[in-house]
């Protein structure tokens, strides 16, 4: 009879409480953290796509003084793309483009994501510019 009572109490209230208090919150944290990390990966992909398109556009332009690009549909979370700090690059014929975005998720807050693209102009243009999705 003793073995039967031990087996009956083996899956009792203690194991249920441990599951409710430890395992389920841990699983919830892991799932929400992975979703937050996945959204960062998607945002980084969008920034790389914007930088690639901006460099292709800049490569083919003969006059970069009026460089602008409408890529608001590619910016994460409905933000808008603004270019600033336009200046000459360090080398002649070089185009440097940096695109930044600040991620504010449930766990990873205020994380600055940035990507840069360095290329050479077909028309010997020279530009260094920073774009921000905000």
Image (cartoon, helix red, strand yellow):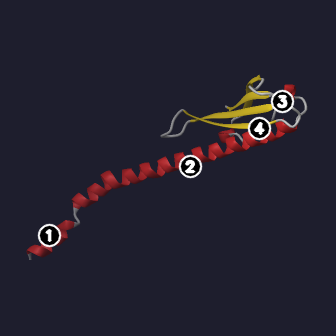
Residue 111, relative to residue 11: is it above or below? Answer: above
Task: Name, please, the residue furthest toward the right.
Answer: 62
The x, y position of residue 43, in whole percent, is: 63, 43
The residue carrying pointer 4 sits among few (fewer than 14), some (14 to 19) or many (20 or more) residues within 10 Å by Cα, namely: some
| Disc 3 element | loop
The residue carrying pointer 2 sits among few (fewer than 14), some (14 to 19) or many (20 or more) residues within 10 Å by Cα, namely: few
Rendering quarter of residue 104: top right
> What residue is disc 2 on?
38
| Alpha-carbon span between mark 1 and mark 4 | 72 Å
Foreground residue, 82 or 117?
Answer: 117
Of the residues under marks 2 and 3, which one precedes in the sequence? 2
Q: Identify the residue shown where x is 86% and y is 31%.
A: 124
Of the residues under marks 1 and 4, which one precedes in the sequence? 1
The x, y position of residue 1, in whole percent, is: 9, 77
| Alpha-carbon span between mark 3 and mark 4 | 15 Å
The x, y position of residue 79, in whole percent, is: 69, 35
Residue 1, relative to residue 30: is it above or below? Answer: below
| Alpha-carbon span between mark 1 and mark 2 | 45 Å
| Alpha-carbon span between mark 2 and mark 3 | 32 Å
Q: Which mark is residue 119?
A: 4
| Disc 4 element | strand
Q: Identify the residue shown where x is 69% and y is 33%.
A: 98
């Amino acid at each position: 009879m003793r073995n039967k009572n031990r087996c009956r109490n083996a899956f009792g209230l203690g194991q249920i409480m441990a599951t409710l208090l430890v395992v389920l919150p841990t699983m919830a944290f892991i799932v929400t953290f992975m979703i937050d990390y996945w959204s960062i990966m998607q945002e980084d992909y969008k920034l790389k796509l914007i930088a690639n398109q901006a460099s292709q556009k800049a490569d083919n332009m003969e006059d970069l003084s009026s460089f602008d690009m409408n890529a608001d549909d590619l910016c994460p979370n409905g933000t808008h793309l603004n270019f600033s700090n336009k200046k000459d690059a360090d080398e002649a014929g070089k185009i440097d483009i940096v695109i930044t975005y600040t991620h504010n998720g449930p766990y990873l807050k205020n994380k600055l994501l940035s990507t840069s693209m360095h290329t050479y102009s077909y028309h010997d243009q020279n530009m260094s510019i920073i774009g921000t999705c905000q």
